[in-house]
Amino acid sequence: MWDWVGQIDQLKKQSKPVCMITVAGVEGSAPREIGAKMLVLEDGAFWGTIGGGNLEFLAIHEAKKQLQQGTSEKIRFPLGAKTGQCCGGVVELLFESMNTGPQLYLFGAGHVGQAIARALNESVFTVHAIDERDEWLSQMPQGVIRHSTEPETFISNTHFNPARTYCVVLTHRHDLDEQLIRLLIDKNPFYLGLIGSESKWNRFQQRLQAKGITPSSLERVKCPIGIGVFGKAPSEIAVSVGAELLKLHYESRK
């Protein structure tokens, strides 16, 4: 039996938007039973079947539209001349868009990274934590997608959608922070934040410019992160950063 649950989980880890199509209702003759499913990506690639033929062609077209809009909808398809079918029945399909919301990538699973993850874990953001230190990554709250790999490798192997990508760099090493900022600037995320002080960022800018990063590119980096400095405890930083990211997301939707 096709493991659609595992397929969705894999696509979620890859931050790939996917529309799940489910046969939600059947009247009369139909090519598949209630509960049959398909998964459709933005480029039209798919897994599973709801019956083939022109009905499936129309469903894939509709799924791509739902993904573009980030919406979910239930639609009835009469199986007659308009759909190129001759079953004579009616199929009701449920289209559910997944992984279309903002993706937050926390590069570093230390104390502050864990606090930010806890603050935004049940928000509109899908939270990812990237760290090669399994002992820290294992402490991330349930629901956070954990990537046990070197952050540089993750950046190189991951396709980011700039419009919905938020990145926060907060590793345990300043040299790694600097290297990740250099790599992430090329990915052009909607938000790119670096934990640290203004003096840390001034030093980083000097070194990054010496490596060929333009001042205009560096202006896209937010450092210090958050809506203000109200305290240095991880939980307090998380509140400040969480408020900043939520404000940016909802303002961008207006």
Image: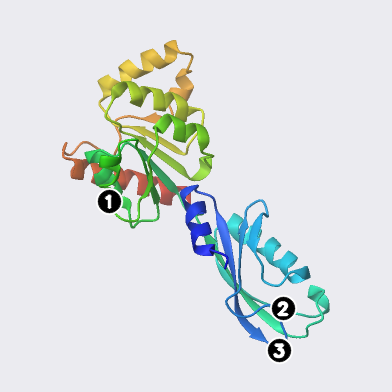
State the CA–CA distance, disc 2 to disc 3.
Answer: 10 Å
According to the image, label 3 marks what residue?
28
**Looking at the image, is mark 3 or mark 1 nearer the viewer?**
3
Q: Position of residue 233 (x, y in %)?
A: 16, 40
Above or below for 7 versus 22: above
According to the image, label 2 marks what residue?
31
Q: Badge 1 local density, few (<14 within 10 Å), some, or many (20+)? A: some
Q: Badge 3 local density, few (<14 within 10 Å), some, or many (20+)? A: few
Label located before the other in sequence (2 or 1): 2
Q: Where is residue 242 in the image (x, y as percent from the top left)?
A: 30, 46
Give the residue type that dot 3 points to: Gly
Above or below for 219 versus 18: above
Q: Do the residues labelled 2 and 1 touch (CB within 8 Å)?
A: no
Q: Residue at x 45, y 35 (%)?
A: 154
Quadrant of residue 177 in the image?
top left
Between residue 153 and residue 59, name the one nearer to us. 153
Q: Residue at x 59, y 57 (%)?
A: 67
Residue 240 shows up from this direction? no
According to the image, label 1 marks what residue?
119
Label located before the other in sequence (3 or 1): 3
**Looking at the image, is mark 2 or mark 3 nearer the viewer?**
2
Image-based side of 41 in relation to 203, left or right: right
